[in-house]
Amino acid sequence: MITSEEIKRRLWDGATELRGSMDASRYKDYMLGLMFYKFLSDKTLEAFKVTSGLGNLTESELVEEYTEAKAEYGEQLDKMIQNVLGYYVSPEYLYQTWLKDINSGEFEVQKVTDSLNNFERTIAASGDSNDFRGLFSSSTLDLTDTALGSNLNERSKSVKALILLFADLNMVALQKGDVLGDAYEYLIGQFAMESGKKAGEFYTPRQVSEVMAQIAAKTPGIKTIYDPTVGSGSLLLTVRKHLDEDVQRSLSYYGQEKNTATYNLTRMNLLLHGVRPEKMTIKNGDTLSQDWPEDPEHANEGVLFDAVVMNPPYSVKNWNRAGLKVSDPRFEVAGVLPPDSKGDFAFLLHGLFHLGQNGTMAIVLPHGVLFRGSSEGEIRERLLKKNYMDTIIGLPNNLFSNTGIPVVVIILKKNRRIDEPVLIIDASHSYIKVGKQNVLQEKDIAKIVDTYIERREEKGYSHLATREEIMDNQYNLNIPRYIEAVDGEIPHDVDAHLYGGIPRSNINELKILQSTVPDIMEQSLKEIRQGYVELAKPVEEISSDILNDPRIIEQLKKLECKAMAYVDKYWRILRNGRVEIDSTPLMEEMLVEIKEILSHFPNIDVYDGYQIVAEIWKNSLIHDTEIIALSDFYTAGRTREPNMVTKGTGDKKREEQDGWVGSIVPNKLIAKQLFSAELAEIESKNIRIQEIETELSDLVEAAKAEDSDEANALNGILNEAGEAFENKLVKVELKKAIKGTVEYKLLSKVEKLFTDKSALSKAVKEDEKALKEAVQERILTLTNEEIDNLMYEKWFGNTVDAMVALVERSLKTELNTLQMLHNRYADTLSAMDDEGRDLESEFEALMNELVVKL
C-alpha cells in the first residue's frame, strides 16, 4: 500500500542518487519527461484494455494482447485508441517494451530515442491538437548529451536507471485522486530548490502560489484562467485546487512560456493532473514581444480572462527588443512605455490588458514597482487614477530560491468603485526560518487571504488607503508610508528610572489584562505618586491570582468544551472512514471551522489555532487519510509495511529492510501505550547506566586532582587524553594492587562500575530488540478499541490542551511584560548612585587600612 508521500520520497531519493553531478534544472527534463512517457504508455494500455473489453490481465499479458491486436488490426486499432485519448503509443515503442529489453539484456538508448521520435511523428501525422507535439524534442530530451555519461555505455546505464525508477508505478491508478499530479508537482518543486537561481525559470514557491491562487479563486463565476509566464504551470494548478470540482471540470487554462523545455514541462504537468487537452491552450512564445492570445474575430483585441495570475522574471533588462510602441493596445492604458531597463510593468500591463471586466489579476513583483519614479511612476499614477489597483501585499524577503529580495503581490481589478480604497497588507514579518529560506506558515497565508476578503484594517498589519492619502504621497505606494511597524519595545521613562515606579500608561497598555481582570490588576498595584505605581505583590502571585480567577477558569472550560466537541466531530468522521484519497475538502472544512470557533473567544489569535490544525494535517492526516481511503480505518490500523533503511555509502549504498512499521499506527505509540512495563524497565536500566557514568566521571576528576589518595590510585588508568578510564589498564593495575589497600578498593570500584555498565548496556540492547519485535507483531493483532486509542492519541492527543493554552498564552505574554517593567524600574538611578557612593567609601576605607598596615 504505497502512498503519495512515499512515492514522492522514493522518486526524489532516486533522482538524487542517479543524477550525480548533472545540474538539477537540466536533469529534471530527463526524469520528468520519461515519467510522462510512462504515463502515456500506461494510458494507451488502459484504453486498449477498456475498448477491447478485456478482463483482469497482468501487465505483460496486456502488452502481448496489444501486440497481437496491432498485428491484426493495424491502423484501425490506432484510430480507436486515438479517438479515446487523442494519441497512442505503438506496442514496439511502449515503456513496457523498454523494460522487457532491459530485463533481457537487449536494451539500447537508440530504442528510447526512436520511441520518442515515433510518438512525435504519430501526433504530427494524426493532425491532432498541438498538446502533445514537441514534448520530446531533442532540445528537451537529448539522449546523446554527454552530461548523461561520457560514452554510450555510461549514457545507457544512466537512462536504464531512470527507466527502472518508474517501472512498478501504475500511472493510470495514480492519476486518481491526483496522486500522480501531486508527485510530479513535488518533483518540480524539489528540482527548483536544487536549481538555485535557475529555479525562477520554471517554479513559484508554494506559499506564494497559495496566496495568489486563493485570492484568484475567489473570482465569482470563474471559467477561464491565464498565466502569461506560465513556467511549469504550478500557479494555474494551485488556483484549480481551490475551486469546486464542477468548476474545475469546466475551467479552461491558457498560458505562454518562452523557454521550450519549460513549455513542454507545463503541458506534461497539466495533462498529468487530469486536465483534458481541449481545456488547455499553452503556447511557446515571448509574452512581451508579441501579444497573445488575440481575439481571432477582432483585430488588436486580446482575449479576456476571468483570472490572470503570473510570476514574471523580475526587472528584465532590454525587454523591448521587438521595438514596441505605446500605441500597442496593451500599453495604451498607461500612456507611456515601461523603461527598457526594467520589464516589471510591461508584464503587469500585459496581464491587465487580458483581464476581464469582472476578473481578478494577481502578480508578484519586486518592491521597487511601488515607489520607483520616471515612467514607472507615471504608469503607477495612471493605474491608481483609473482605480485598477485593488490590493498590495508585502511579503518577506528570501522566499524564493533564486533571489533574496522582498516581493509584493499586487491584486488588480477593473470593476472597482471609484471611491474604493486600496488595501495594503504588510506581511513581511510573518514567516519562520527553514534552512536558509524564509517560509510563510499556513496561518500566515490564511491571515493574508482573510484580510483581503474582509478588507479589514489591523494596526501594524493592514490599512485601507484612500485616494486622498495616495495623492498626498504622490502616488508612491511604498508600504511603510501607510503602515507603521508595531514596535514591541516599550520606551523607557526617565522619571521612572530616576524615582522608581512603573508608569501607569504602560500598565494601561496591557489591554488583555485590563479588559479581562481589571479588578485584580488594580488590587495588585500601589500608587507611589501621580502616574506611577509599584507592584503590591510579586508577579508570580499576580499570575496565580489571574489564572485561577473564576472568569478565566470559566473561559478555559468553555473553550475546552468547544475544542472537545470539534475534535470529537472530526474524530468520528475520520474513524468511520468517510474520507477520500484527495482529503483537501475535509482539511479545508476543519480549518474554516476552527477559525469560526476561536473567533468567539476574545484575546485569542485565531490563526494560532488554525496553525495547530494545519500541523495535524501536515504531520499525520495527509498521509493517513490516503491509506484509510484505500482500505478502511481498522484494516489500515492493523497493516504494517517494511521499514526500509539506507546502508552503505557511494557505490555500496543500498536499501535494506529493518523490521516493520505500522502503516498508520506509530510503533513508538504502541510501545508507549501497550508495553509500558517493558519501557519502564528499559528506562530504569538506562538511568542506572547514567548514574554509573556520573560516578565514573567523578572518579576521573578525582584522579586528575593533585596529592590525593584517589589521584595516586587512579591516575595511572586514565587514557592518553586524560578524560576517561581505560578498561584494560584497570585490569592490569588491579592485578598489581595489594588487597585491602585504598588503591585496591578504588580500582575494584572502577572495575565493578565498568562491569555493571557493560552488563546493563547488553541487557538494554536485548530488551530493546525484544520490545521492537513484540511491537512489530502486535500491529497485526491490535483490537479495534486499541486502534481507536492509539490513533486518537496520534491525531488529537494534545489538541484540546493546545487550544486551551491559547487563552493562557495571551495572558502570560502581558504578565511577562509586567515582570519586565518591574525589573526595569526596580533600581532607581538615585539608589544606584547611593550604592555607588557606599562602595566608594568602603573602597577608600580599605585603601586607608592597607596604607596603615604598610
Image: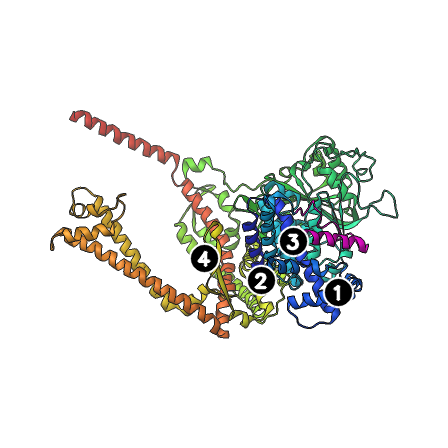
- Give the foreground label among 1 and 2: 1
Q: Secondary structure at mark 4?
A: helix
Q: Secondary structure at mark 1?
A: helix
The amino acid sitting under disc 2 is: Thr
| In front of the other: 47 or 246 | 47
Q: Which of marks 2 and 1 precedes in the sequence?
A: 2
Q: Residue at x 54, y 50 (%)?
A: 17
The amino acid sitting under disc 3 is: Leu
Q: Position of residue 723 (x, y in %)?
A: 27, 45
Q: Determine which of the numbered discs, if any, sits on residue 547 in the image.
A: 4
Q: Are marks 1 and 4 in contact (CB under 8 Å)?
A: no
User: How many angstroms separate mark 3 from mark 2 (CA)?
Assistant: 21 Å
Q: Residue at x 18, y 41 (%)?
A: 706
Q: Which residue is mark 2?
A: 3
Q: Give the residues in magenta.
A: 113-142
User: How many angstroms separate mark 4 from mark 3 (CA)?
Assistant: 62 Å
- Give the foreground label among 3 and 2: 3
Q: Secondary structure at mark 3?
A: helix
| Neighbour tally class for label 3: few under 14, some 14-19, many 20 plus, Cα within 10 Å | many
In the image, 735: left or right of 295? left
- Give the foreground label among 1 and 3: 1
Q: Which residue is mark 1?
A: 71
Q: Determine which of the numbered discs, if any, sits on residue 1 in the image.
A: none
Q: Secondary structure at mark 2?
A: loop
